Image (tube, rainbow, N blue to C red):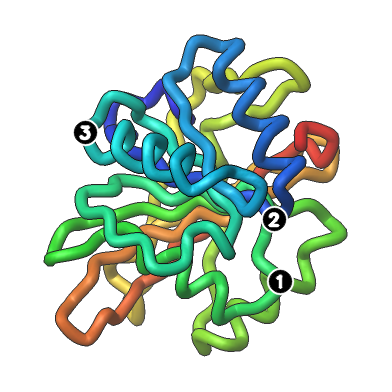
């Protein structure tokens, strides 16, 4: 996913500080310029990380929900929920980090089988069923690779901006939400279901 040139600026949410550190280390080892902020980071370290991200010196910022409170960063092209949020309100708060000022943003959420109830809570909260299609992405333990098959896209008459992809691989699924922010901050979520519950 991060190899996609359209991912110009990515904010990745992790549920725990240890999880954020592990993911940061993994991405740095794969030569992705990555910063991380969480409660164990000093104020100076967080300020430096945000400065690097805002200046586009680093394309990826990993954060916990608490550390991300009050952030005002424009031009974030993608939000990734590496861990599903525990509440629908947190999900919407994360989504609101991208697609600002009339721009189009995309939110992609990784959801294990154990987290499917959280995904259902989100759908209930937004009063919208997130449709599913085949996904072009396959997750392996060590890297993310692209399937050569072309994804199919469909539009729902009730939700013309929504298109979705689905594939299961070792029980791991992904919910992908594309939305456009209007002044009233109305969202049209999009879901992909994908895979590998062991790749956390």
**Relative to 127, is 44 above or below?**
above
**Relative to 134, is 8 above or below?**
above
Q: Which is in the foreground here, disc 1 or disc 2? A: 2
Residue hosting label 1: 86
The mark found on residue 15 in the picture is: 2
What percent of the width, then of the height, locates residue 154?
Answer: 38, 57
The residue sitting at 76% across, 41% down in the picture is 18
Q: Quadrant of residue 158?
A: bottom left
Q: Secondary structure at mark 3?
A: loop
The mark found on residue 173 in the picture is: none
Distance from the alpha carbon under mark 3 to that under mark 2 = 26 Å
The residue sitting at 76% across, 44% down in the picture is 172
| Left or right, residue 58 beside residue 173 | left
Residue hosting label 3: 55
Q: Secondary structure at mark 1?
A: loop
Q: Which is in the foreground here, disc 3 or disc 1? A: 3
Sequence-wise first label, 1 or 2? 2
Q: Quadrant of residue 141?
A: top right
């Amino acid at each position: 996913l991060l190899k996609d040139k359209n991912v110009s600026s990515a904010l990745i949410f992790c549920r725990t500080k240890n999880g954020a550190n592990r993911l940061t280390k993994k991405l740095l080892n794969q030569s992705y310029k990555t910063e991380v902020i969480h409660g164990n980071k000093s104020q100076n370290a967080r300020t430096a990380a945000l400065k690097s991200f805002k200046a586009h010196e680093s394309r990826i910022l990993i954060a916990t929900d608490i550390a991300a409170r009050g952030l005002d960063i424009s031009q974030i092209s993608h939000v990734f929920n590496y861990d599903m949020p525990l509440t629908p309100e947190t999900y919407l708060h994360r989504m609101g980090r991208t697609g600002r000022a009339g721009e189009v943003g995309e939110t992609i959420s990784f959801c294990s089988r154990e987290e499917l109830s959280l995904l259902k809570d989100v759908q209930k909260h937004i009063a919208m069923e997130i449709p599913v299609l085949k996904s072009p992405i396959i997750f392996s333990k060590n890297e993310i690779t692209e399937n050569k098959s072309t994804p199919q896209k469909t539009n729902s008459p009730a939700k013309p901006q929504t298109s979705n992809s689905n594939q299961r691989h070792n029980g791991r699924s992904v919910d992908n939400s594309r939305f456009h922010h209007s002044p009233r901050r109305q969202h049209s979520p999009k879901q992909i279901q994908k895979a590998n519950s062991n790749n956390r």
